[in-house]
Image: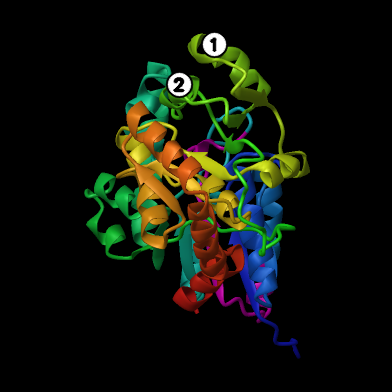
Amino acid sequence: MNIKQEKRCIVHIPNHIEKSGKSGSNIRPIKMKQAFEENGYLVEYISGYGTERKVQINKIKRNIRNGIKYDFLYSESSTMPTLLTEKNHLPRYPFLDFSFFKFCKKNGIKIGLFYRDIQWKFSVYRDNVSWYKKCFSIPMYRYDLRQYKKLLNVFYLPTDEMRAYLKEYPELLNRSAILMPGCAEYDVDAVQAISDLTAKKLEILYVGGIDRIYDLTVFFQAMQQMPDQVHAYVCCREKEWENAKSKYLPYMSEKISIIHESGQGLEPYYKKADICCAFAGEGDYMRMAMPIKVFEYLGHYIPIIATKDTAAGKFIEKENLGWSIEYNQEALKQCLHNILQNPALLQEKRESEISAYEANTWKARAKQVILDLK
């Protein structure tokens, strides 16, 4: 049988993806699929609930048996255990995904998996999930890791800091690599003039969560004490604001505007912004996390303020993309006053972002996987 030789790969997502979803768990898999295509690959895409994945998996198995070659399989874990990703969270397809991994491994296809999150090891998960759900979910998370140990060639993590929470899996850590989020391409003027802060306010933009994991209390408190020359837009989900606003209302003023935008609706606010904010809490989980929004900020060439000694803060400091500061009001106020007095600092950071952009696109992330797994 004469089969046209094309560059082919498999992208596997063990759950349903909302294409219009705004969270990293919805955005990242789609961006990676597109990035493999930009690198010249024909992508066989597996995602959805079990019935859909079963059809897609069987098709790929037939292709392999018929001699079609796939260079590698790239997967991303769900925020839930693999066996519990059905609508009702019951393990209706207990062997579907990992038996497919075994089939690929047996046929010489290397496998890399991005391990999205490890919230289940932190109090933010344990304190917000009922005990009976934890009785099922935590053993299932551990089951996933045992399967990964047997099947993966490369175990991708979002940050180096996550390794500290996986020490009981040394075989996996020996095969681990860092695969951070990437930047998309935006309609941004790379030669934007230095902001004239004598003629306009210093505009700050925060996009993301405001409750449970992410805490903007210190940011709101500091903003309350800044001069009127500083203004912030805080963009979050409307429902999340309704749930959390009682915590923030004591610190609200005309210096902070709450908005509920996403996608193209955010672009006018990015165009106004002089600084983007990743200064949203501290603690063990925040030290380890790498919010996808950091790379959205980078893709818009907007300098970033982040919390010192977090993964995001270290990345921003290393690449000179903004300011990594202690998590307290005084540090934030001092940082903002310094920018008001020295607006040329904004252009310096912006130029660093322009230089860093190409190495941090989704296409570059996909290229890393291709080189690792070919």
How much space separates mark 2 and mark 1, taking CA atoms? Answer: 15 Å
> What residue do we see at 68% from left, 61% from top?
185
Q: Quadrant of residue 298?
A: bottom right
Crowd around label 2: few <14 · some 14–19 · many ≥20 (10 Å):
few
Q: Amino acid at mark 1?
A: Leu
Q: Which residues are magenta?
A: 60-86
- What SS does tag 2 mark? loop
In the image, residue 83 lies in the stretch drawn in magenta: yes
Residue 38 appears left or right of 315:
right
Q: Residues within 10 Å of mark 1 (few under 14, many from 20)?
A: few
Of residues 22 and 189, the one nearer the viewer is 189
Pinpoint residue 138: horizontal percent, then vertical percent.
Answer: 37, 33
Say left or right for 218 vs 366: left
Q: Is residue 254 visible?
A: yes
Q: Which residue is mark 2?
A: 225
Report which residue position mark 1 lands on.
Answer: 249
Q: Residue furthest front?
A: 198
Q: Is residue 244 above or below residue 326?
A: above
